[in-house]
Amino acid sequence: RIAEVHAVEILDSRARPTLAVVLRTPQGLKVRAGVPSGASTGRREAVELRDGDPDRYGGKGVSRAVAAVNGEIADALTGREFDSFREVDDALRELDGTEDKSRLGANALVGVSMAAARAEALLGDRELWEHLAAVAGARPRLPVPHFNVVNGGAHADNPLDFQEFMVAPLGAPSMAEAVRAGAEVYAALRGRLAGLGEPLGLGDEGGFAPTVTLEQPEEVLELLVGAIGDAGYEAGRGGVALALDPAASGFAADGGGYTVAGESLTSDQLIDRYEEMVDRFPVWSIEDGLGEDDREGWTRLTARLGGRVQLVGDDVFVTNPGIIAEAVQAKIGTAALIKVNQVGTVSETLDAVRVCREAGYAQMVSHRSGETEDAFIADLAVGTGCGQIKAGAPARGERAAKYARLLEVADARPGLEYGWVRAR
Ligand code: PGA
Ligand code: ZN
């Protein structure tokens, strides 16, 4: 039962408004959730409600979403009996009444949904990850962290077109050693960038945002292999591997094709380029290698490289169970990125995970570029047992909070296995 649900307009890690939701139960329990927000969003994501009032936060205020929680949603939920957070989610969806959650806002809905899941776990005297595992019927597992150490694209004001360059300690023996590897590679990378005379400013996800000497993605990959070696690790799947999120919708050209470092490429030329990167560097995963509208390209990319690297769909799948099911039919990708606010409720997020599992698609739980200190996704990654998470650099509080939560869980449950899982 819900005694009270209340939202406040707070700031995210980019100084843009988002929601904090507080939920109370009659037993005196109080839980909180912070709502994440993306910058390079897929077109078919559930709709984040922004005020559009240019006099407040340049139009980015969320006072309407806050009012939806404190008005309509509170009226509908308060005092009502729910057997599970899924029932709360169903009630939220019904109340909103739109396919894309645009009336009350996916940001309003997801905050309430996250808080409801958390309250239910506490009422059952379970950790959130334990509860999510029970609900999802999954075997919990500590995920391989994908540390985003170089930022470009929509997350940094620099010449790099690719959005994210990540290091993934696939070969680490434990969660604690994986986090140590991430931090040590980050420190080594900082040294290399300083040596190049690069400014050491950070992008939105806490990775470095070099502006001077690096333009081509291959140059960054080479630098990362060097930094991994400097830190004393093996660059590769047995040690620290590389992962990319080019977020290719961000550099798709208007009439089709792509522009990378000023050069025009067709889909097939970009696929060739990825193949060369996979030949030359220990890249194990590529997310959004092509744009969300380039579905034929995606099918060709999957046929060409799907057997060699993981191909993750983010903007193309938007954590939507129905869209993922369609993509499986079209043989697009081999894995899905999982973001709660992309679909708008926790139970639909778990549905997306289930669709992936049934189709033999891997899953990577993900933060957004705009974050709060809420570490919900750490529990989600452990609870779904998907074996992979990306939560940005091992730096900046809102990113480090996720890794801290994973370390806490690992410490409390030494029996939990660490590592990625082959989906099929
Ligand atoms: P976003 O980027 O949170 O800005 O959408 C993250 C991603 O593309 O994976
Ligand atoms: Zn992405």
Image (spheres, rainbow, N blue to C red):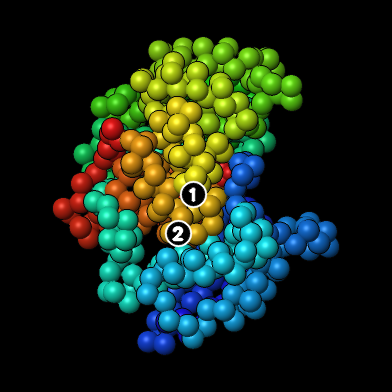
Which of the two residues, 214 or 41, is positioned nearer the viewer here? 41
Residue 58 as seen in the image, left or right of residue 29: right
Q: Position of residue 310 (x, y in %)?
A: 39, 28
Which of the two residues, 251 or 391, is positioned nearer the viewer here? 251
- Amino acid type of disc 2? Val
**Labelled disc at residue 346:** 2
x 49%, y 45%: residue: 322
Query: Can you tell which quarter of the image residue 212 is in?
Result: top right
Q: Nearer the viewer, mark 2 or mark 1?
A: 2
At mark 2, the secondary structure is helix
x 45%, y 39%: residue: 325
Mark 1 near ligand 1 (CB under 8 Å)?
Answer: yes
At mark 1, the secondary structure is loop
Residue 6 as seen in the image, left or right of residue 30: right
x 56%, y 38%: residue: 315
Can residue 376 be seen in the rendering of this structure? yes
Q: Position of residue 63 (x, y in %)?
A: 70, 69
- Amino acid type of disc 1? Lys
Would you say the residues marked 2 and 1 are in contact, meaning their CB atoms lie under 8 Å apart?
no
Which of the two residues, 53 or 162, is positioned nearer the viewer here? 53
Q: Position of residue 108 (x, y in %)?
A: 60, 65
Mark 2 near ligand 1 (CB under 8 Å)?
Answer: no
Can residue 277 be seen in the rendering of this structure? no
Is 189 above or below relative to 393? above
Residue 218 as seen in the image, left or right of residue 363: right
Quarter of the image with the N terminus is bottom left
x 75%, y 62%: residue: 51
Quarter of the image with the C terminus is top left
Within 10 Å of disc 2 (Cα), the crowding (few <14, some 14-19, many 20+) is many
Q: Position of residue 246 (x, y in %)?
A: 55, 29
Q: Which residue is mark 1?
A: 339
